[in-house]
Image (cartoon, helix red, strand yellow):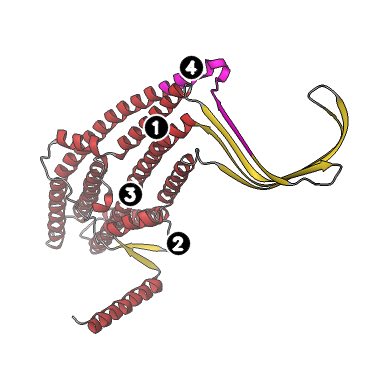
């Protein structure tokens, strides 16, 4: 294809995209599928955005900690005017009238060497922990979005079941009324049959309200405009196939223990606490340094005039050790850091147990839901066949409409059970997928 043909193709794509946007704007609906919902979660979910800012703040803290050994530079002028008594070092008190001024630049450095060494290391680990927590949050948000989207599909599928059941109920109510009018049936049966359309209208209204609520939940998670109306691309609940039957549970648990970002988060926090502990243990023996240097023009004289201006350099150096609470504070700080390390170690053990339990539960859910699918398929098939046979018996004057109503109710119940099983199977796989430490952007129906 030539470059000109490429340009023509790009133009056609832009025209088609604009046309699709115009159609979407006209009917005020946004067609969406599971993959699109997950991508929008990365781009628009507010919890994801908040954690990104936490990572940015932790990065700034790391950069700040790396500047602990950098001097502070000052530039400006200093004026001093004194009038009145002043005591000399000999103890004599004189009446003094004087003025002085200094103009130049200076640099000041006050460094806690232990903090300058260990604080950037701890900040580096804290940044890793915040990044890991952002990943944990992202996995949670993607799971929430997938769950909400499947709830939307389930709600809309329930609406379709209610619509079909209402149509069947109206059909049977009309047949029963005709039987009563012709004397071939009882008016009591006609009255009973008239109840079913009313009940299914009620369930239809409730199902549509649930569908609106499910769409609102998805829109809220994706931070969409309040006027956006979501229309799923899928006509029915998809059947995901993420995990084949018979996978080794122990291997999946090992994968989760290695791949979960929560472990990375606690490992980073543990390393940061270790660096804090080292700073407290060895900081007592590492001196602090104070350095001040200034260079500029200094002048002064009796009275308010400034004379005898000349260049001046000043340098002051301090090297000292600090013992908080006469050294007792050092021991308490070490004890506190050791307790933090033990706490994080216990949290890692607790997380290990939680991951194992979560994977085992999700794995059992996948196996159970997979086994339910053929059962619900068979139930729908038998219920549909029973309903059709009962309707044929009515037309052949061999059966009563009330018998067909029982079959109709069984068919609707079987269809709803099949929807529940499909959604349950998808959710169980998605939960297992997340429990193993995998992000949901890799899920494709």
- The N terminus lies in quadrant: bottom left
Residue at 14 percent of width and 42 percent of height: 371
Say left or right for 53 vs 171.
Answer: right
Depth order, front residue of 386/291: 291
The picture quadrant where one finds residue 231 is bottom left
Q: Given this view, does label 2 or label 1 mark the residue nearer the observer?
A: 1
Q: Is residue 174 magenta?
A: no
The residue tagged 4 is: 331
Residue at 54 percent of width and 30 percent of height: 289
Neighbour tally class for label 3: few under 14, some 14-19, many 20 plus, Cα within 10 Å:
many
The residue tagged 3 is: 142
* Whole-number angstrom distance, CA of label 1 to CA of label 4: 19 Å
Residue 89 place in picture, x, y as percent: 78, 24
- The C terminus lies in quadrant: bottom left
- Dot 1: element: helix
Q: Is residue 318 magenta?
A: yes
The residue tagged 1 is: 272
Label 2 vs 3, first from the N-terminus: 3
Neighbour tally class for label 4: few under 14, some 14-19, many 20 plus, Cα within 10 Å:
few
Q: Given this view, does label 3 or label 1 mark the residue nearer the observer?
A: 1
The residue tagged 2 is: 225
Q: In the displayed structure, would residue 163 be above or below residue 294?
A: below
Residue at 10 percent of width and 40 percent of height: 246
Range of magenta residues: 314-339
């Amino acid at each position: 294809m030539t470059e000109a043909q490429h340009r023509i193709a790009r133009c056609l794509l832009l025209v088609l995209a604009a046309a699709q946007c115009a159609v979407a704007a006209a009917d005020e609906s946004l067609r969406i599928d599971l993959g699109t919902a997950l991508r929008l979660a990365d781009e628009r979910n507010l919890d994801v955005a908040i954690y990104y800012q936490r990572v940015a703040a932790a990065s700034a803290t790391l950069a700040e900690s790396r500047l602990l050994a950098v001097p502070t530079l000052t530039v400006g002028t200093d004026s001093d005017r004194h009038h009145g008594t002043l005591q000399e070092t000999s103890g004599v008190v004189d009446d003094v009238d004087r003025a002085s001024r200094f103009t130049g630049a200076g640099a000041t450095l006050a460094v806690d060497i232990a903090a300058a060494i260990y604080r950037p290391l701890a900040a580096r680990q804290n940044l890793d922990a915040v990044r890991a927590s952002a990943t944990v949050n992202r996995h949670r948000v993607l799971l929430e979005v997938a769950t909400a989207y499947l709830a939307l599909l389930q709600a809309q599928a329930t609406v379709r079941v209610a619509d079909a059941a209402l149509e069947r109920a109206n059909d049977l109510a009309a047949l029963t009324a005709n039987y009563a009018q012709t004397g071939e049936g009882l008016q009591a049966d006609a009255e009973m049959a008239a109840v079913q359309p009313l009940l299914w209208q009620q369930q239809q209204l409730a199902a549509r309200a649930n569908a609106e609520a499910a769409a609102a939940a998805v829109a809220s998670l994706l931070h969409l405009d309040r006027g956006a109306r979501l229309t799923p691309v899928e006509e029915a609940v998809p059947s995901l196939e993420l995990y084949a039957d018979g996978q080794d549970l122990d291997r999946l648990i090992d994968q989760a223990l290695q791949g979960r970002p929560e472990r990375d988060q606690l490992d980073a926090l543990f390393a940061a606490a270790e660096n804090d502990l080292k700073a407290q243990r060895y900081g007592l023996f590492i001196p602090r340094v104070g350095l001040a240097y200034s260079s500029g023009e200094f002048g002064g004289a009796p009275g308010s005039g400034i004379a005898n201006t000349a260049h001046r350099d000043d340098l002051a150096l301090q090297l000292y050790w600090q013992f908080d609470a006469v050294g007792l504070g050092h021991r308490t700080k070490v004890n506190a850091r050791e307790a933090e390390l033990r706490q994080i170690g216990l949290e890692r053990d607790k997380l290990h147990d939680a991951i194992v339990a979560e994977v085992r539960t999700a794995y059992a859910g996948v196996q159970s839901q997979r086994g339910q699918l053929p059962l619900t398929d068979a139930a729908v098939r038998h219920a549909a066949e029973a309903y059709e046979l009962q309707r044929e018996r009515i037309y052949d004057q061999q059966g009563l409409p009330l018998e067909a109503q029982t079959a109709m109710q069984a068919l609707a119940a079987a269809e709803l059970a099949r929807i529940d099983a499909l959604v349950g199977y998808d959710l169980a796989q998605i939960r297992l997928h997340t429990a193993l430490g995998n992000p949901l952007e890799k899920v494709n129906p």
